[in-house]
Image (cartoon, rainbow, N blue to C red):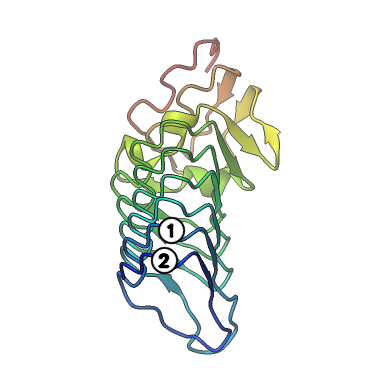
Amino acid sequence: MGCQELTSIIMPDSIIRIPDNIFYGCVKLVNVIIPNSVMPDSIIRIPDNIFYGCVKLVNVIIPNSVSEIGDCAFYYCSSLTNIIIPNNVTSIGYCAFCYCGKLTDITIGSKVKQVGNSAFGNCKKLSSVYITDLSAYLNINFDNNYSNPIYYANKLYLNKKRVVGEVTIPVGVKQIPIYAFAGLDSITSIIIPDCVTSIGYAAFNGCDRLANV
């Protein structure tokens, strides 16, 4: 915590737990590699506030063994440009990436179920959100508009292809979350099946070319 000269971290494979706040305010930290441990007690959580205020952090690899990203974990990491949330992550804490002012791309894994309040608040340079499973994305519970990176990004990519034209909500989806397609002016029509029981606030806000539902 507050290691002013620390620039790089490579954690050993033997590490199984990381405490909260440990790299809080390490303002010269640039690169972090967290091991993808397969040990029974392996790292499953990125702790609260772990990289809070690491303003020079550019590269961080979150391993597949992680299932949870804690509150404010990357708060004010203002040099981060992209982040990949691996497929085993199920929850992202509140303000987890808040004030990551240079963040442009985010990949959301297919098992994310919950994204906390303002997880992407003030990430105003976000331009692209990448997903691999539309059903999984639509079943995420976003706490508020700043929880959904689409609020800023306005571009959604499914399996690396931009979502354009007609969109069919997959059978089995029960909700369309808040700001799910906000700002996607590439969408012209959308098909919503009977299984959908709720549509979140501003789900289609700014879809200026949407002509048919």
Task: Check disc 1 and give the amino acid type.
Answer: Lys
Q: Name the residue at 31% across, 56% down.
A: 72
* Mark 1, secondary structure of its residue: loop
Question: Where is mark 2, residue-wise?
Answer: 5
Q: Name the residue at 31% across, 72% down.
A: 20
> Residue 12: x percent and y percent?
56, 83
Q: Name the residue at 44% across, 68% down.
A: 6
- The quarter of the rendered structure image containing the N terminus is bottom left
Q: Nearer the viewer, residue 119 or 73?
A: 73
Label 2, residues with CA under 10 Å away: few <14, some 14-19, many ≥20: few
**Left or right position of 88 against 27:** right
Extreme-front residue of the structure: 5
Q: Name the residue at 60% across, 18% down.
A: 186
- Up the image or down, 158 lies above or below 209; here it is below
- Up the image or down, 72 lies above or below 76; here it is below
Q: Nearer the viewer, residue 28 or 183?
A: 28
> Residue 67: x percent and y percent?
47, 68
* Mark 2, secondary structure of its residue: loop
Can I make out residue 172 in this image?
Answer: no
Q: Earlier in the sequence, mark 2 or mark 1?
A: 2
Count of numbered labels shown in the rendering:
2
Question: Where is mark 1, residue-wise?
Answer: 28
Can I make out residue 177 in this image?
Answer: yes
> Residue 77: x percent and y percent?
40, 50
